[in-house]
Image (cartoon, rainbow, N blue to C red):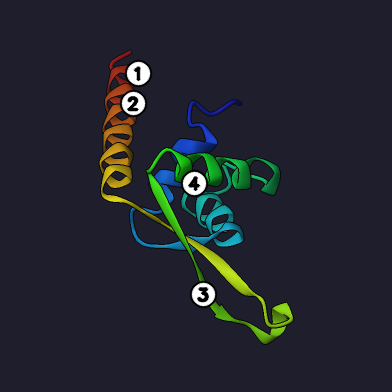
Amino acid sequence: MDTPISARTAILMSLIGGRGFGLEIIERVRERTNGKIHLNEGSVYPALKALEREGLLRSFDGDPLPERGGRPRRYYELTGEGRKVAREQRTALLSLLQTVEAF
């Protein structure tokens, strides 16, 4: 069954609780939805870049990691506007759920 939640919405809502890096975001969404929403790298990274361009996310490099050959992970976090949009989308989805449950 298709989900009414886009990768963009899932990413924003997954970051309400704090920053995360790409694969961590994918896993967070899968865990929080009990596997009902599965994002893949091919959709997450372009969405992260678009959300950053729109001013909803900011990114920064973490510390270099030996297991990554000394390269850092890229972390993403919500901006103030991103937090506002994520909460609005969450509210809209909850409203939709209440409407559906009325049937």
* CA gap, disc 4 and disc 2: 15 Å
Residue 100 has which mark?
1
The answer to whether the residue labelled 2 contacts the one labelled 3, judged by CB atoms less than 8 Å apart, is no
The residue positioned 35% from the left and 18% from the top of the image is 100
User: Judging from the image, what secondary structure is the residue with disc 4 in?
Assistant: loop
Asked which quadrant contains residue 97, the reply is top left
> In x, y percent, where is residue 64?
60, 81
Q: Earlier in the sequence, mark 2 or mark 3?
A: 3
Residue 80 in the image: above or below residue 9: below
Residue linked to disc 2: 97
The answer to whether the residue labelled 4 contacts the one labelled 1, judged by CB atoms less than 8 Å apart, is no
User: Judging from the image, what secondary structure is the residue with disc 1 in?
Assistant: helix
Residue linked to disc 4: 33
Asked which quadrant contains residue 47, the reply is top right
Q: Earlier in the sequence, mark 4 or mark 2?
A: 4
The residue positioned 52% from the left and 39% from the top of the image is 50
* CA gap, disc 3 and disc 1: 42 Å
Outermost residue to the top: 103
The answer to whether the residue labelled 2 contacts the one labelled 1, judged by CB atoms less than 8 Å apart, is yes
* CA gap, disc 2 and disc 1: 5 Å
- Tell me which amino acid carries mark 2: Leu
The residue positioned 58% from the left and 53% from the top of the image is 26
- Tell me which amino acid carries mark 3: Gly
| Mark 2: few/some/many CA within 10 Å (<14, 14-19, 20+) | few
Residue linked to disc 3: 62
> In x, y percent, where is residue 99?
29, 18
Q: Is residue 84 left or right of residue 23?
A: left
In this view, the residue in front, 95 or 22, is: 22
| Mark 3: few/some/many CA within 10 Å (<14, 14-19, 20+) | few
Q: Earlier in the sequence, mark 4 or mark 1?
A: 4
* CA gap, disc 2 and disc 3: 38 Å
* CA gap, disc 4 and disc 1: 19 Å
